[in-house]
Amino acid sequence: MKSPLIGITTYRTRNRQGYAQICLNEAYVTALEGAGAQPCLIPPGLSTASLEGLLGRLDGVIFSGGGDIQPERYGSQPHPLVENVDPDRDQTELFLLQRLVDSGTPFLGICRGMQIINVGLGGSLFEDILDQRPDSLRHQSPDEWPRDRLAHPVQVEPDTRLCEVLGQSSLQVNSQHHQAVRRLAPALRPAAFAPDGVLEACELPDHPFGVAVQWHPEWLQAHPPMQALFRSLVEACCQRQSA
């Protein structure tokens, strides 16, 4: 069986000369390749025809981290702390999500990826955790912290796919987000919580692999449970190939 081809969504930025660039932290690619997959980067703003053609070749998708989602997408209003919004990226990822759900194609959401999955299935977000839940932990670690620094524990819900994958019910994670799930989409199941009650993971029941986490496992590949998360995605993609 060939290695599964797994797409990873990307974001836009500009170089010093002002030219648009398509970007992704290399840690996603390294983690996915290390788990036995062939990574494929998915640019924002592709046409529907291009996305449909790409989906016909992909065995799975990772929704990566990045900027905030348009508040209008989840029935909210503009907020002064919402930043780095890219409507094209929102549109691309929401289109992909619906196709992946309908087709039973495996997917993994990471940080923003968890948020777009929740929004796409009918949930909503806190535009800024500390502004709207002032008693919460600080989930957005300082920029000077290394990305693999463990910030707080999470408690994984028993009898979830995530608990089975990680092989443990509690673990320490890194944290790089200022937004979080406010109302969980009806189709999703909560899978892990931070000590302050912020949702840290969710999953789509009765789907071959529809899992999302709020932390960044791509930066934590020195930890076996985080390796297992990527391996489980790859295994689900291989099973889909066989089917």
Image (tube, rainbow, N blue to C red):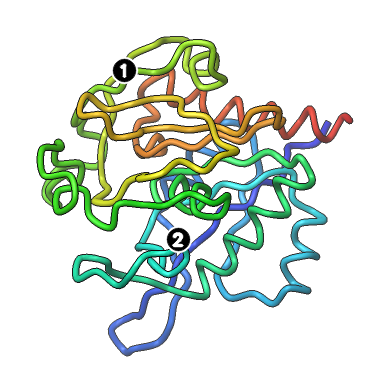
Q: Secondary structure at mark 2?
A: helix
Q: Residue at x 20, y 65 (%)?
A: 81
Q: Residue at x 20, y 29 (%)?
A: 196
The 10 Å Cα crowd at callout 1, few under 14, some 14 to 19, many 20 or more, is few
Which image quadrant is residue 230 in? top right
Q: Amino acid at mark 1?
A: Leu
Q: Residue at x 59, y 60 (%)?
A: 94
Residue at 83%, 35% (x, y): give it: 241
Specify whether 151 is left or right of 242.
Answer: left
Image height check: is 51 above or below 162? below
Q: CA distance from mark 1 to mark 2?
A: 30 Å
Q: Position of residue 53 (x, y in %)?
A: 80, 65
Residue 1 percent location from the top left of the image: 83, 31
Q: Position of residue 157 (x, y in %)?
A: 43, 16
Residue 171's disc is 1
Callout 2: 10 Å neighbours few (<14), some, many (20+)? some
Secondary element type, mark 1:
strand
- Does residue 170 lie above or below 6 as drawn? above
Left or right of 159, for residue 105: right
Dot 2 amino acid type: Tyr
Q: Nearer the viewer, residue 133 or 46?
A: 133
Q: Which tag, 1 or 2, sits closer to the chain's start? A: 2
> Is the Cβ of the residue at disc 1 closer than 8 Å to that at disc 2?
no
42 shown above or below 113: below
User: Is 67 in front, or is 241?
Assistant: 67
The residue labelled by disc 2 is: 74
Residue 209 disc label: none
Using residue 83 as the reference point, say whether residue 192 is left or right of it. Answer: right
Using the rendered view, name the quadrant where residue 23 is placed.
bottom left
